[in-house]
Image (tube, grey):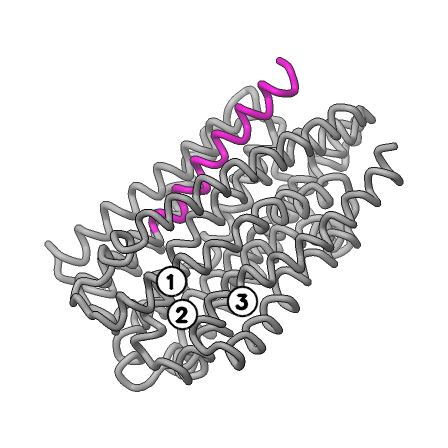
């Protein structure tokens, strides 16, 4: 199979899988808006960064370990077999912290994230339940990454899509026919990764699988090596959580709970776009790592070009669609027909989404840096995009232009990151791929 056909297969299937993940978050938002109105959306948006952090740690451990597995496997090294079990053990240790805090201090968490007494009452049960299932969220990401890197992108896609569809269906069933409200939404979200893990087991127990679970003492050294390569995946996931926290605090001071509800619509809709570009990046990564490990530099360069072009085409399509359908998108989540929420949401979604003209290339570029073991450059561009640029842009733009400035902070931050990413890719082209 040619490089181009491999790219098309891996990327298209991974995009579908990643979009599936984002769609169940949108389903949560929609059903919660129907059941609890603006207060429900506000509660969901305030605790969403906690979910992003859980998922980001799983992504860092899973994607980083899977990259190490793929590169070492391409080089024929036996140590590749130890990375899967090592990842699962460290994910369990990391998730234990979330289980303890979420189980004991859910009200304090929501209050610390900006929730008032009304929002705490709405969101406490949701927070306690989904944080109690943190190990399964992390394990699901690890299993999916290893299955994809072991040459079974179709199984990885099926696991993600089916678990997402399960979540959407059970969201409705538990929230409305069973009348469980936010508890039902949390249970549907919490159980869905278990479905994904079970489907991944189809590959693990097949003859095609080269993944092995090896009992042994967990290796901190191997985990650190993996996390270095998984940092871009971590920041790619956590950046939405960090952005949400910063924006929530700023918007609460400018426009109150209604403004946060509007941002909840914008942020959760943007997760679909982010998932598309994460799909391009993570879909191309196994191929880039394999060809890099085998020393085929021309194929690596071609994969980078295809990734950048694909991201640009997708970005133009997404931005155009959102500008055209902005009113319709916001109205879907505005069950109370709040005119203020609608006004904030329509302006916000149009301005915010301009950032994806740069974000797509940033996500693909940073993923490429990790895939070729350029850990330092990947770390720099990831931190710039996920933390430094977005926080500074949000604070400064909101001070200058109020709510309009908040919406424009994302495009400004992505533009800054874009310039840094281009410089990093040029350096890699000269040093590694020349």
- Residue range corresponding to the magenta coloring: 1-24
Label ID, residue 47: 2
Dot 1: element = helix
**N-terminal label among 3 and 1:** 1
Q: Residue at x 38, y 62 (%)?
A: 130
Q: Is residue 9 above or below residue 134?
A: above
Closest to the observer, 285 or 355: 355
* Mark 3–mark 1 distance (CA, rounded to whole Å): 30 Å
Neighbor class of circle 2 (other Cα within 10 Å; few <14, some 14-19, many 20+) is many
Residue 261, picture quadrant: bottom left
Q: Which residue is mark 3?
A: 409
Task: State the residue at coordinates (46%, 42%).
Answer: 18
Q: Residues within 10 Å of mark 3 (few under 14, many from 20)?
A: many
Q: Nearer the viewer, mark 2 or mark 1?
A: 2
Residue 120 position, x and y percent, is 31, 80
Residue hosting label 1: 130
The picture places residue 144, in percent across and down from the top left corner, at 52, 39
Q: Kindly identify which numbered label has been placed on residue 258.
A: none
Q: Is residue 372 left or right of residue 144?
A: right
281 above or below 322? above
The label nearer to you, 3 versus 1, is: 3
Work out how far the residue at label 3 is from the one at label 2, CA to CA, in angstroms: 21 Å
Q: Are marks 2 and 1 in contact (CB under 8 Å)?
A: yes
Residue at the (58%, 37%) spot, across then down: 146
Q: Secondary structure at mark 3?
A: helix
Q: Classify mark 2: helix, strand or loop.
A: helix
């Amino acid at each position: 199979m040619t490089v181009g056909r491999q790219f098309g297969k891996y990327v298209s299937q991974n995009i579908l899988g990643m979009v599936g993940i984002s769609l169940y978050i949108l389903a949560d938002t929609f059903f919660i808006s129907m059941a609890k109105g603006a207060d429900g959306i506000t509660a969901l948006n305030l605790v969403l960064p906690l979910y992003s952090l859980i998922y980001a740690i799983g992504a860092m451990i899973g994607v980083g370990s899977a990259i190490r597995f793929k590169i070492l496997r391409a080089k024929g090294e036996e140590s590749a077999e130890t990375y899967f079990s090592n990842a699962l053990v460290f994910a369990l240790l990391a998730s234990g912290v979330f289980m303890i805090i979420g189980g004991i201090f859910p009200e304090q968490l929501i209050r610390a994230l900006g929730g008032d007494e009304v929002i705490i009452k709405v969101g406490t049960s949701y927070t306690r339940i989904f944080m109690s299932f943190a190990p399964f969220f992390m394990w699901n990401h690890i299993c999916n990454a290893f299955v994809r890197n072991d040459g079974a992108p179709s199984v990885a896609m099926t696991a993600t899509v089916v678990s997402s569809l399960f979540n959407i269906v059970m969201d409705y069933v538990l929230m409305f026919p069973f009348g469980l409200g936010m508890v039902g939404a949390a249970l549907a979200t919490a159980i869905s990764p278990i479905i994904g893990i079970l489907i991944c087991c189809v590959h693990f127990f097949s003859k095609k699988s080269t993944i092995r679970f090896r009992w042994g003492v967990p290796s901190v050294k191997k985990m650190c090596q993996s996390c270095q390569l998984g940092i871009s995946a971590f920041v790619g996931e956590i950046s939405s959580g960090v952005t949400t926290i910063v924006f929530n605090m700023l918007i609460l001071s400018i426009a109150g709970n209604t403004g946060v509800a509007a941002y909840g619509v914008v942020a959760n809709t943007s997760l679909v776009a982010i998932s598309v570009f994460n799909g391009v990046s993570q879909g191309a990564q196994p191929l880039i790592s394999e060809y890099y490990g085998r020393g085929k530099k021309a194929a690596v360069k071609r994969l980078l070009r295809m990734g950048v072009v694909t991201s640009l085409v997708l970005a133009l399509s997404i931005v155009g669609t959102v500008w055209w359908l902005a009113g319709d998108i916001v109205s879907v989540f505005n069950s109370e027909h709040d005119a203020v929420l609608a006004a904030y949401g329509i302006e916000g979604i149009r301005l915010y989404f301009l950032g994806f003209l740069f974000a797509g290339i940033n996500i693909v570029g940073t993923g490429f840096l990790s895939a070729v073991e350029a850990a330092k450059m990947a770390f720099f561009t990831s931190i710039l995009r996920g933390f430094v640029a977005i926080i500074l842009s949000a604070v400064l733009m909101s001070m200058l232009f109020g709510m309009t400035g908040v919406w424009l902070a994302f495009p400004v931050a992505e533009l800054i990151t874009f310039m840094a990413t281009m410089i990093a890719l040029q350096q890699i082209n000269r040093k590694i791929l020349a």
